[in-house]
Amino acid sequence: MKVLTRLVTNGLLETLLMVGASGAVSIILGTLVGAGLTFFSDPALGRDWPINRRLRLDQILSLIVNVGRSLPFLVLMVAIIPFTRMIMGTSIGTRAAIVPLSVGAIPFAARVVESSLREVDRGVVEAALVMGASPSQVVFRVMFPEALPSLVMGFTLTLVSLVNFSAMAGAVGGGGLGDLAIRYGYQRFRTDVMLATVAVLIALVQLIQWAGHALASAIDRRR
């Protein structure tokens, strides 16, 4: 029992490290990409900027995001092994898994941000512009606060997806609960390890979902 507890605890800590680090990176970069998608595709904000008319930044960003979302995670993880090795010095282990997890989640987070910002009432955006706010101020000081509850729920789904991705990463040497389930539960026919791993993963996902819903509800009530 003590051995099982130690194995599950170590696997959980590795999973939390992967999800926490990749979640922070993907949410920060995904927010910037999502804001860019919204900004450069909105005629009232940045669509008619000279640089956007020449380079069509909205279309370039959208293409990159669509390509990123189209790749299955396991394919992506293998495809960027050289990049992972360049960043982390290795392509195996918990630290290395953070790189493909982050890369895989950034497009998802970007679409979450874009969708949430597009849900903001156009009247609020136009009123801010009429009052003299710059396009960047409208995005970050008007649209983001208005969309905050939706953003929190979207980022919650991003973290839940990262838990699933981390389990797949564990199956190919990424560590965490996925690695524990494969190496000890499946390959060594340890049903107790498999059941314990599944139970912890379910509990972790439920905890993330509950926390995200509670935070979004609290923010919505304050508004």
Image (tube, grey):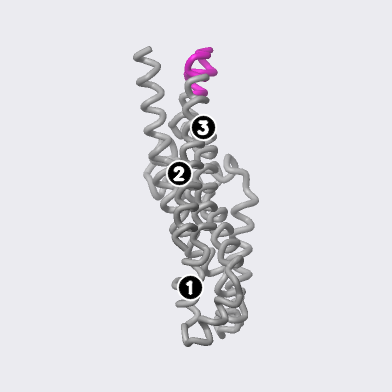
Horizontal and vertical percent for residue 123? Answer: 59, 77
Horizontal and vertical percent for residue 192? Answer: 49, 14
Mark 1 falls on what kind of element?
helix
Horizontal and vertical percent for residue 141? Answer: 44, 73
Amino acid type at image mark 3 = Val
**In terms of image quadrants, where is residue 125?**
bottom right
Point 45% across, 48% down: residue: 23
Real-space CA distance between mark 3 and mark 2, rounded to the nearest whole angstrom: 30 Å
Q: Quadrant of the N terminus?
A: top left
Tag 2 residue:
211
Mark 2 falls on what kind of element?
helix
Give neighbour class at mark 2: few <14, some 14-19, many 20+ (Cα, 10 Å): some
Magenta segment, prevailing SS (helix, strand or loop): helix
Classify 3 as above or below 207: above
Point 41% across, 30% down: residue: 12
N-term-proximal mark, 1 vs 3: 1
- Look at discs 3 and 2 and give the one toward the viewer: 2
Real-space CA distance between mark 1 and mark 2, rounded to the nearest whole angstrom: 25 Å
Asked whether the residues under the numbered discs 1 and 2 touch, taking CB atoms below 8 Å apart as contact, a structural biologist would say no
Tag 3 residue:
172
Point 52% across, 23% down: residue: 182
Give neighbour class at mark 1: few <14, some 14-19, many 20+ (Cα, 10 Å): some
Please tell me whether residue 187 belongs to the stretch shown in magenta.
yes
Amino acid type at image mark 1 = Val
N-term-proximal mark, 3 vs 2: 3
Tag 1 residue:
142
